[in-house]
Image (tube, rainbow, N blue to C red):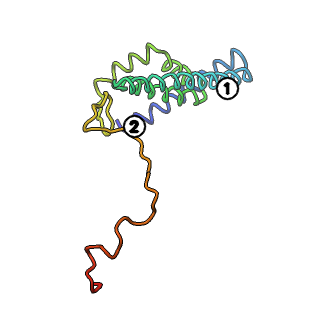
């Protein structure tokens, strides 16, 4: 079981190299390299656009007092898609583009939501009810004298002997 990640890494490398060879034999090496760079650029721009859209939806959910858990799962899938699209290769680009599709994101959200423990700390998702009284007003100082109103001679703390 501890060899599974290493096995998956070698399997991924084998799939990517095989696809590179097949595509290069079909369209040429230079076009294959250009296609890899092009798919990475397109993928990154798609992730950027969808990421901003998801961020706006997350802010709207928070402002409406709803749980943003679905948008958070969607943002995780966008991060994973962006990572896969940056790795050069056709198979990882395919997996990254799959993660950008809304039906795939929705099914991923439905599968992951029951396993998530959402703990709220700090702020409210709902509208908070104010407690206590709040008074709104303005303040302006109107006394013209800057001297103390109580002279030190008449102060109760000091007796006549200065003690």
Picture quarter with the C terminus: bottom left
Q: Which of the 4 image quarters holds residue 45?
A: top right
Q: Are marks 1 and 2 in contact (CB under 8 Å)?
A: no
Depth order, front residue of 112/17: 112
Q: Residue at x 51, y 28 (%)?
A: 12
Q: Position of residue 33 (x, y in %)?
A: 69, 25
Q: Secondary structure at mark 2?
A: loop
Depth order, front residue of 97/157: 157
> Looking at the image, how many numbered discs can be counted on the residues?
2
Picture quarter with the N terminus: top left
Q: Residue at x 49, y 30 (%)?
A: 79
Depth order, front residue of 109/29: 109
Q: Secondary structure at mark 1?
A: helix
Front: mark 1 or 2: 1
Q: Position of residue 144 (x, y in %)?
A: 46, 57
- Residue, disc 1: 37
Q: Position of residue 124 (x, y in %)?
A: 31, 33
Q: Residue furthest top?
A: 103
Q: Is the residue marked by circle 2 packed among few (<14), some (14-19), or many (20+) residues within 10 Å?
A: few
Q: Judge left or right: residue 81 versus residue 118.
A: right
Mark 1 vs 2, N-terminal side: 2
Q: Which mark is residue 3?
A: 2
Q: Is the residue marked by circle 1 packed among few (<14), some (14-19), or many (20+) residues within 10 Å?
A: some
Q: Which of the 4 image quarters holds residue 133?
A: top left
Depth order, front residue of 67/96: 67
User: How far is mark 1 from mark 2, CA to CA?
Assistant: 32 Å
Seen in the picture, residue 78 relative to 130 is either above or below; the reply is above
Q: Position of residue 71 (x, y in %)?
A: 41, 24
């Amino acid at each position: 079981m501890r060899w599974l990640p290493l096995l998956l890494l070698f399997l991924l490398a084998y799939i990517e190299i095989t696809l590179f060879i097949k595509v290069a034999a079909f369209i040429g090496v230079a076009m294959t390299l250009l296609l890899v760079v092009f798919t990475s650029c397109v993928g990154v721009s798609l992730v950027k656009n969808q990421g901003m859209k998801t961020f706006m939806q997350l802010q709207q959910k928070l402002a409406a007092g709803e749980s943003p858990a679905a948008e958070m799962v969607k943002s995780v899938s966008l991060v994973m898609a962006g990572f896969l699209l940056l790795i050069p290769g056709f198979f990882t680009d395919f997996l990254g583009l799959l993660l950008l599709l809304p039906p795939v994101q929705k099914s991923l959200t439905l599968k992951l939501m029951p396993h998530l423990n959402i703990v709220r700390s700090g702020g409210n998702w709902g509208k908070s009810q104010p407690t206590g009284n709040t008074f709104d007003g303005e303040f302006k100082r109107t006394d013209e004298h800057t001297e103390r109103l109580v002279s030190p001679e008449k102060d109760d703390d000091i007796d006549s002997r200065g003690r």
